[in-house]
Amino acid sequence: MGKSYKRHIAKTITWRIVGTVDTVLLSWFITGDPYTGLKIGLSEVLTKMVLYYLHERVWFKIKAGVTKDGDSKKRHIAKTVTWRIVGTIDTMAMAWFITGNPLTGLKIGMIEVVTKMALYYFHERTWYKFDYGLTSRKNRIIKEESEAIVLEGVTSENKKQN
């Protein structure tokens, strides 16, 4: 298994712990029932881990906001927004299914938009400080930038000759 896969699995697990605790507490607060909070939070563990892993893999292939020095804060914000859309839809559907009340799902989902975006952003910034699984990505980016510079140089030479 490549290092990037290991990184994405590790990020998936750490984020799921943070996200599940938040969902359980919010669901408990909104429904007034700790058991319902636990059911909603724990039911999401598998769906969210799969969705988060897929989200990480997609963003790994997207180069927007990636430089030779690493990922930009704009990239982290974009990842935060896209993940929150996916996560909120999943939370609202699960809460609706478990409580039988679409309004409860909507309430939990809307509050989660705020709490989870803040938590996710800090999760991303924390992971950014660790190079675990990034070596090959940084090397690939540097190589691609070097190839682009060489290609630009060849194009410039061709223009001068014509």
Image: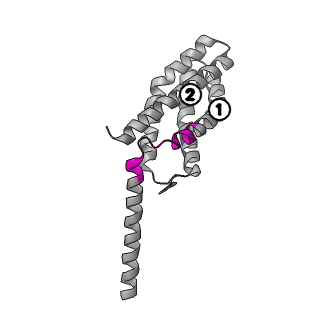
Q: Is residue 65 left or right of residue 28?
A: left
* Residue 160 visible to an observer of this rendering: yes
Q: Residue 157, percent across and down?
A: 38, 82
Q: Residue 62, percent across and down?
A: 45, 51
User: Which is nearer the eye, 103 or 3?
Assistant: 3
Q: What distance separates the C-alpha of mark 1 from that of mark 2?
A: 11 Å
> If the image is split into quadrants, where does the N terminus sit?
top left
Which of disc 2 and disc 1 is earlier in sequence?
2
* Residue 162 visible to an observer of this rendering: no
- The verdict on residue 8 being magenta is no
Contact? badges 1 and 2 (CB < 8 Å):
no
Q: How many marks?
A: 2
Q: Which of the 4 quarters of the picture holds residue 18? A: top right
Residue in the picture at 59% in, 20% down: 24
Task: Tell me the tag on residue 30.
Answer: none
Q: Is residue 151 left or right of residue 52?
A: left
User: What type is the residue that disc 2 sits on?
Assistant: Val
Magenta-highlighted residues = 123-138
Residue in the picture at 41% in, 69% down: 149
Residue ID for mark 1? 115
The crowd level at tag 1 (other Cα within 10 Å; few <14, some 14-19, many 20+) is: some
Q: Is residue 26 left or right of residue 9?
A: right
From the image, give the main secondary structure of the stretch colored magenta: helix
Residue ID for mark 2? 18
Residue in the picture at 64% in, 17% down: 28
Q: Tag 1's secondary structure?
A: helix
Q: Residue 106, percent across and down?
A: 63, 27
Q: Tag 2's secondary structure?
A: helix
